[in-house]
Amino acid sequence: MKIWKRAFVASLGISAALTLLSAPVGLAADKQENPQLVLWMDHPAKEKSWNNAFPVGNGRLGAMVFGGVSEEHIQFNEDTLWAGKPHDYVREGAYDLLGKMRDFIFAGNAKGAEALAGRTSPTFLSDPIRQLPYQPFGDLHLTFPTQGGESYRRELNLNDAVARVTYESGGVTYTRDCFASFPDQVIVYHVHASRPGQVTFAVGMSTPHKESEVRVLGSDVLELSGKVQPDGLRFDARLRAMATGGTISTRDGQLVINGADSATLLLTGATSFVNFQDISGDPARKADADMQKLAGKTYEQLWDAHEEDFHNLFDRVRLNLGHTGAADKPTDERVAACRTGGLARDPGLATLDFQYGRYLLISCSRAGGQPANLQGLWNADLNPPWESKWTTNINLEMNYWPAEVANLGECTAPLFDLIDDLAISGARTAKEQYHAGGWVLHHNTDLWRGTAPINGPDGVWPTGGAWLCYHLWEHYLFTQDKDFLAKRAYPDMKSASQFFVDTLVKDPRTGWLVTTPSFSPEHGGLVAGPAMDMQLIRALFDSTIEASHILKVDPDFAHQLADLRAKLVPDQVGHFGQLQEWEQDLDAENDNHRHMSPLWGLYPGAQFTPANPKIWSAANVLLKQRGDGSTGWSYAWRICLWARADNGDRAFSQLSDLLGKRTLPNMWDLCGPFQIDGNFGACAGIGEMLLQSQQLTDGQRGDPVIELLPALPKPWAAGEVSGLRARGGFEVAETWQNGELTQATIKSLLGNPVDVRYHGHDVRLTTQPGGTYVLDANLGSH
């Protein structure tokens, strides 16, 4: 049983007895490269094997590097290039169907309600019924005179965020580096030879969009311009070549570098997107301006700026779970070995997977850009799976599960910008579709911030906004930033709460307040009051009430929320001891559904604790009954859930299955096709196995609580981690041997009190801002 979840029996005020240190938390902060943090293969990605290429990104621009020798392919994206145009998805007359759907559901006629959420008119669904897809931007095609290539190696080095290819030919060693710079907003591709005058190649540009053209601008620049559709987004990219030695010329619409010592390609790109309601921007002007800012900068200067920026984020967390000879093998072989239990023999692969998740989040979610979508930032298809948009009944949220605990809080900025936009478009949907105030989001959105239900009956799920607001509150819990709470989080939380104040209805069968029509994602049919809805609304009301107390605003509204919260359908126990998924006891035993919706209150929520043994036990019964995962993100969610349920070995089993069954050779996650949420969920799950913290549980406010090594699996008998973040404003380092904690270091960023717990030991620290506290296995001073 998790110690921090027990009633707190006794606290030891030992802060005076602890040594207040000035040394940094955790491991020594050296700059030596960690060889464990490199994905590598001894062969290029085949031309049709996009899933084998390596990704680079700066949050806005992303590229996939294939690594061919004589022919290299770089496919690239810009995060605002989508099909469609500004559009309000609310269907006229949808509100007229709302009462009829509710009547059908309360009468036990789900099919009647679902007929009104179908694809034929009249329908409660959006107009049009589907949303629009994220689009590829273009491709670079490089042709080298080199044939063959000995000692070939292709790698993605997470230490420096660079995709690198090296090989030998004719006694010359060639190195090609590709990285995406956030400070300079450019993709950089650099070719170097070990002997002078040996760099020769041609490069051209193309795009899958038909309305496009490539032009030569002078002797060293290409321009790619076009539009996705006649009335949609326009785009423009610039490719500039620089060389040390040799010559640069143009031929047949390509740039040709001949006889250089080294050469550098600079790629900028932009679209006409201004915001989700305005696409009047000038992409050519923006792409050219970004290129002009690079004038006079050397490759070394670009590299240094990129490295400083990336290391500022990535180096915050160090993890070492051990190293075996398996780590010396190519990454695709290591992943394949997980199909036969190889993860237990290769603990370094779990380290790599954790840090890969952090690398990917840095690469696809930076301030000023769009949030990580279903494929992060990377997409080569005009019609990608599920439109590569934002699915908000698990997938978008899972993308951001590791952000706070893995010390990448800044990477949440695009998500919060999205929420601000959705509060605008969602207010229109709330008003027109529900005659309600506040804002609502159903289970998907796109660049145009669609908030109405899409696709079919499973799209009629009105609590996506409540879930996104949980991320606003989590950011506050980790940072305690009252300015953020007042200006960003609370207004959106209050407005989201208002929607449910206006739309919750009494179920005549039970007397409880419910959402309806709704759908337990993506399981069953249209219902009233599924468990996940109630858990999300309780969490939203709790955080909004707590925020109003902290900010000393809206006491009457907080009181109204508290009154409504008490009338929501409570979590219930069903006929085989399980936590019910629905208001009615409809669960089937051993239902191995991919969604774990009724267990939201266990993770990522914090509503189920042994303080309520009946619900805690029922949640564990359901978790066991749901069995193993199926899709990659389903395995990832189970990693997090088993960690919260105190079972590190079951969490490890799900991680092993995720890597062995649903992971591509380049370590990307598979849903069916590639989908990046499993990468982020696994990263969060590994963090949850090593460190857990809470501050607000089931509406009860308390001091922050940190539990050390709460779900350590047997295969990770020895290790160390530093830089993980805990709620309440703390940074934590841990070392362990033989499966037992040897030392923990708690750095208090804000000076809050904290309860620290490990294996039956409890200690209360009264901290000072910036203070560092070292504890031994008994939580005594060290």
Image (cartoon, rainbow, N blue to C red):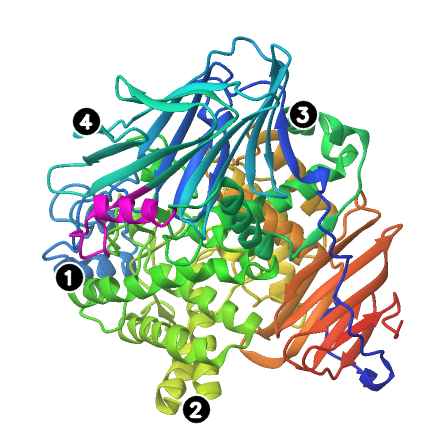
As for residue 293 lying within the magenta part, the answer is yes
Give residue 611's position: percent from left, percent from top.
Answer: 66, 72
Give residue 287's position: percent from left, percent from top.
Answer: 28, 44
Q: Please tell me whether mark 3 or mark 2 is closer to you in this view.
A: 3
- Relative to residue 248, is residue 775 depicted above or below? below
For the question of whether residue 277 can be seen, the reply is yes
Left-right relation of 355 to 557: right
Q: CA distance from mark 4 to mark 3?
A: 39 Å
Q: Which mark is residue 615?
A: none
**Residue highlighted by disc 3:** 330
**Residue highlighted by disc 1:** 95
Q: Residue at the spot x=39%, y=43% of the render?
A: 61
Q: Residue at the spot x=50%, y=40% of the render?
A: 299
| Local secondary structure at mark 4 | loop
Q: CA distance from mark 4 to mark 1?
A: 40 Å
Identify which amino acid the numbered label 4 is placed on: Lys
Q: CA distance from mark 2 to mark 1?
A: 36 Å
**Residue highlighted by disc 2:** 552
Neighbours of disc 1 within 10 Å: few (<14), some (14-19), many (20+): some
Quadrant position of residue 151? top right
Q: CA distance from mark 1 to mark 3?
A: 57 Å
Q: CA distance from mark 3 to mark 2?
A: 57 Å
Quadrant placement of the C terminus:
bottom right
| Local secondary structure at mark 1 | helix
Q: Which residues are magenta?
A: 269-294
Q: Which mark is residue 210?
A: 4
Q: Between disc 3 and disc 2, whose residue precedes? A: 3
Residues tagged 4 and 1 counted as in contact (Cβ below 8 A): no
Q: Between disc 4 and disc 3, whose residue precedes? A: 4
Identify which amino acid the numbered label 2 is placed on: Lys
Identify which amino acid the numbered label 3 is placed on: Pro
